[in-house]
Amino acid sequence: MAKRENFTAERVTRFQCEPGRQQSIHWDGKTPGLGLRVTAAGTKSYVFETSLHGKTLRVTIGDTRTWTIGKAQAEATRLNILTDQGIDPRQQRREQAVAAAVAHQAEQQQDLTVGEAWQAYIDARTAKWGERHLRNHQYMTQPGGGKRTRGSRTGESNTIQPGPLHALLSLRLSALDAEVVRDWLEPLAAKTPTQAAQTYRALRAFVAWCADRPEYKALVHADACSRRMARDVLPKAKAKTDCLQREQLATWFQEVRKIGNPVIAVYLQALLLTGARREEMARLRWQDVDFKWQSMTIRDKVEGERTIPLTPYLASLLAGLKRINDTPPPRHRILQGKKIENDLANWKPSEWVFSSPTAKSGRLQEPRINHNKALAAAGLPALTLHGLRRSFGTLTEWVECPAGVVAQIMGHKPSATAEKHYKVRPLDLLRMWHARIEAWTLEQAGIKFKPGKSGLNAVK
């Protein structure tokens, strides 16, 4: 072993790396295990070396520019005491580093806001949500500002208002407790009870998600959104009953078929004749429609997708839309009195069955305005688009269609063990009943239609 010399400032400065070597270690004669490592590049640092569990252990203490001789000797003495007790200083350092990292993370999490956790929640759930559901959640937290482009009413501000959850986003997640939620919910429920109920359900789902996540579990108050609060603050939910009656079918079809936009007219009839949800039908693509085998594949929020029959009358309506969709526009068009040439070289048919050239998405977005006008012209009471789905389910009882068939066409979850495990209805069986439902509906509406004249040949 190299000669030991008591470390002094002069000696530490004088120590050099031995020629031909990458590093040399000079040992202190005063403190056992303390050495000065000098590299060929001239870097100097204090080290501690001893034997632990029959193996050589070496620990770097630090650079000579930051560690004085006295501090290095004190640290070497401390390390010597640890190793005499069988403690590995390297493992101790790792444990301290982990503890410091955990403490730092906990400190950062304490400052985590509801808005940051909400964005993580949206990112995690987006793949499992439909487009409209995601859009509703984004609306709840919108900051507001800017001018409305549509939908403003008389006496109402033209400025976009902040979403109902926006006021909570700046709070720390750990501060979102039952008292805060109640103070936020009560004025909202008094002003817009329906919106308050929908937003509260979304907030409760968010809190439950946070409570299941290890990174948020310690911060969130799992009881921030209790069912008791919902009962106390929110208005009691009323079952919706808007539904077309048998005797109203004739006037409804008459006015809906008069709608100038054929896409909207067919879309509304398709909702009534299939019982599909509004977004399920709006997202229908031409690749989902099989005229040859008379079927439609619908993106389903329950099972992912479902295939239902394409009934004759609806097939004829879609065939008409297909012809319109596949027909190129004229070479010229008149816009504000000027003759403008269309870009036919870049034109291509839309992928959407219910397309809309003016919508950003390329498909139908808001058919309610035309539907409400048709209802007013027919003298019918208010009827939502979901009311058309409800009408399908209700009117099927006139033909005594089995409830399981109706549920499978509409995309409802099976409600009995036999339905879940013992009844697998083929498409042909569904078609028999679905065609019967459509024929009865057209008969009540006074529409004369012969299945053989469906117009399917036009799209072959």
Image (spheres, rainbow, N blue to C red):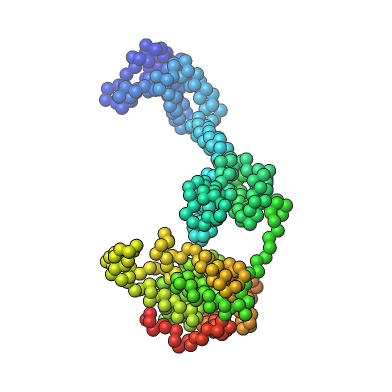
Q: Is residue 433 visible?
A: no
- The spot of residue 382 in percent (x, y) is 61, 68
Determine the residue positioned at 48% across, 82% down.
312
Q: Does residue 372 appear to the left or right of 360 in the view shown? A: right
- Is there any visible trace of residue 392 in the rendered image? yes
Location of residue 433 (image quadrant) = bottom right
Query: As displayed, is residue 134 above or below residue 57?
Result: below
Image point (47%, 15%), residue name: 70
Above or below for 420 versus 440: above
For the point 60% across and 51% down, the residue is 203
Q: In the rendered image of this protein, does residue 189 appear above or below residue 259?
A: above
Which quadrant of the figure contains the N terminus?
top left
Q: Which of the two residues, 92 or 329, is positioned nearer the viewer here?
A: 329
Q: Quadrant of residue 412?
A: bottom right
Q: Residue at x 35, y 15 (%)?
A: 13
Q: Name the spot of residue 238 as percent of width and height, x first.
A: 68, 63
Tell me where residue 183 appears, x and y as whole percent.
Answer: 67, 44
Q: Is residue 360 above or below residue 226?
A: below
Along the viewing direction, whichever of 40 and 459 lies nearer the viewer: 459
Count the labels in the image: 0
Q: Position of residue 378 (x, y in %)?
A: 57, 74
In the drawing, does residue 434 fall left or right of residue 239? left
Residue 12 shown left or right of residue 237 in the figure: left
97 vs 282, nearest the viewer? 282
Q: Quadrant of the C terminus?
A: bottom left
